[in-house]
Amino acid sequence: MDSKPDENFIKKTFPGPRVPSLAPLPLLRGQKALVTGASSGIGQAVAIALAQAGADVAINYGRDEQGADETENAARAAGVKAMIHQADVSKEPEVQGMFRDVIRAFGTIDIVVANAGLQRDAALVDMTLAQWQRVIDVNLTGQLLCAREAVREFCRRGVRREVSVAAGKIICMSSVHDMIPWSGHVNYTASKGGIAMMMRSIAQEVALQRIRVNAISPGAIRTPINTPAWGTREAYDDLLRLIPYQRIGEAGEIGHVAVWLASDYSDYINGATIYVDGGMTLFPGFSHGG
Ligand code: NAD
């Protein structure tokens, strides 16, 4: 399959994001949020959605400074404070420095969305240790480091009744590949499967401190990470065979879920994974017999 994006197909099929047009609700007013990998795709949309819900947002990025600037401008347009912090989430001192910086600027942090992630795909027999290690370091260890710093801050500060009944909320960006095996991506699936148990174990450990830890597992969302899966008609038709709802998802739709999961509307949800996938995890191969 030719995976080079077909610009004509893309323009015709996706004239613009097709997120259901719902007015933002001010569910997070007064809260402070940090979103990692917020310079593009899902992280960018989540940071903007949190800002539109009233949270001040810290925008972490790895390399794409211009993307981070775009996120910051969109967040400020929503009338909240926004700041940018460059850090590689797989590096402990950089993550600790980022939390220090954001807490100094905002006073505290109430919401952490550990979203940064990447793929280094290869068949198992060709996969180098470096490819395995990089994906585990960023996708899994990066989330652990962010969760640990978040829990330290939430415990230090306790509940801020004026903004939320919880002391803090952590949202781990996982994937449907925390439960759907994916050949050629063993490093990626291992990292996302690891997030599932890491998230639930942390949720169990810190529930008494009134900290909620949950995950969002997106299916196919139209972002730069997976252009080969939707960038040509053949690829898109192939993809739709996996999605009962018969369309790719948009990053803003993950933003809607993140806002709700960070708000007190979901206060009794702890240690859960929310699949946002148009039914991809419904085993669509079985929809006609089996
Ligand atoms: P993306 O490539 O657009 O965004 C990834 C972001 O992570 C970028 O901002 C990138 O700069 C950042 N990043 C990568 N390595 C980093 C590092 N070491 N330190 C800090 N930031 C780093 O991809 P996306 O689709 O928006 O993916 C975001 C998350 O959603 C990832 O965890 C991905 O696994 C997950 N996800 C995406 C899809 C999808 O269909 N797009 C599906 C399931 C899960």
Image: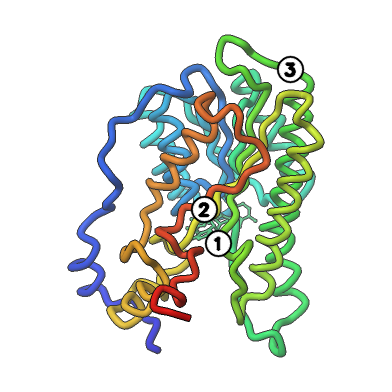
Q: Which residue is mark 1?
A: 176
Asked if residue 52 is positioned above or below residue 244 in the image, the reply reads: above
Q: Quadrant of the N terminus?
A: bottom left
Instruction: Work out whether mark 2 precedes mark 3 in sequence or the reverse, and give the earlier one.
Output: 3
The residue sitting at 48% across, 25% down in the picture is: 55
Where residue 182 sits in the image (x, y, percent)? 59, 75
> Who is closer to the viewer here, 86 or 141?
141
Instruction: Work out whether mark 1 precedes mark 3 in sequence or the reverse, and give the earlier one.
Output: 3
> Who is closer to the viewer here, 20 or 204?
204
- Residue lying at the far top in this picture: please name it: 162
Label 1 close to label 2 by CB (< 8 Å): yes
Where residue 264 sits in the image (x, y, percent)? 54, 24
Residue depth check, mark 1 versus mark 3: number of the one nearer the observer: 1
Indicate how the structure is coloured in the image. rainbow
Disc 1 under 8 Å from ligand 1? The reply is: yes
Alpha carbon separation for disc pair 1 and 3: 34 Å
The residue sitting at 47% across, 61% down in the picture is: 219
Disc 3 under 8 Å from ligand 1? The reply is: no
The residue sitting at 68% across, 16% down in the picture is: 159
SS of the residue under disc 2: strand
Q: Which residue is mark 3?
A: 157
Q: Which residue is mark 2?
A: 275
Where ligand 1 lies, by image quadrant?
A: bottom right
Asked if residue 242 is positioned above or below residue 60 in the image, the reply reads: below
Instruction: Work out whether mark 1 precedes mark 2 in sequence or the reverse, and give the earlier one.
Output: 1
Residue type, numbered disc 1: Val
